[in-house]
Image (tube, grey):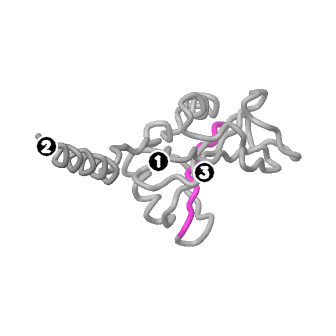
Amino acid sequence: MTKAALYTLTIATAIGTGLTPVPCCAYALDAQLDCKSNAHAFIAPLLTDQYIDPKPMRVEANSVNAFRPAHGSNLTAFGFRVYAVLGYKHGDKMFKQGSGQPITDSAYGAVVAGSAEDVETRVREAGSDAVVRQVIPLLLTVIFCNRQ
């Protein structure tokens, strides 16, 4: 093979490699949002596997911690892109306490991009009894498991 042909092949391979999409798969939270767990069991693996940032982006007065998905983590819940992961477990150092009364002993969930109606349909089809509430009309919806 000539030097020019080898050079052309090398450049073509480099360009082709750069343009090829990196195979990635979404990490689905569907099974964990069956509301049969607790906040620690839901959040700990996401932190360990670096799917969410370890520092909450927000801590509500009721102690619910909102964690941002890590860059490139591609989290989904029932087919919807996850905007934030929520959790709080009383006495668990993984969670910061808010300024008010905690919501409950353990609660967890996710905020997803989608309308409440569409999200509710998919959540119920999956057999989850999670609470589904609209946060921003037609844009963001919360899926929430509140263990009493």
Sequence-wise first label, 3 or 2: 2
Determine whether the residue tagged by mark 1 lies in a helix, strand or loop: loop
Label placed on residue 84? 3
| Residue shown at the point (72%, 40%) measured from the top left | 55
Q: In this view, does 115 lie to the left or right of 21?
A: right
Q: In this view, does 15 lie to the left or right of 138?
A: left
| Residue numbers of the magenta segment | 139-148
| Residue shown at the point (60%, 32%) measured from the top left | 47
Determine whether the residue tagged by mark 3 lies in a helix, strand or loop: strand
| Residue shown at the point (46%, 58%) measured from the top left | 120
Q: In this view, does 139 lie to the left or right of 123?
A: right
Q: State which quadrant residue 122 falls in.
A: bottom left
Give the CA separation, mark 3 to mark 2: 55 Å
Q: Which of 27 and 33 is in front in this view?
A: 27
Q: Which amino acid does label 3 sit on?
A: Ala
Q: Which amino acid does label 2 sit on?
A: Thr
Q: Where is residue 38 in the image (x, y as percent from the top left)?
A: 61, 31
Asked if residue 146 is among those painted magenta in the image, a careful observer would answer: yes
Give the CA separation, mark 3 to mark 1: 11 Å
**Mark 3 or 1, closer to the camera:** 1
Q: What residue type is labelled 1?
A: Asn
| Residue receiving disc 2 | 2
Q: Where is residue 21 in the image (x, y as percent from the top left)?
A: 33, 50
Q: Position of residue 147 (x, y in %)?
A: 63, 37
Please, is residue 136 above or below residue 96 in the view?
Answer: below
| Residue receiving disc 1 | 74
Asked if residue 38 is among those painted magenta in the image, a careful observer would answer: no
Quarter of the image with the N terminus in it: top left
Please, is residue 42 above or below residue 102 in the view?
Answer: above
Q: Position of residue 103 (x, y in %)?
A: 75, 44
Give the CA separation, mark 1 to mark 2: 44 Å
* Prevailing secondary structure class for the magenta stretch in the rendered image: strand
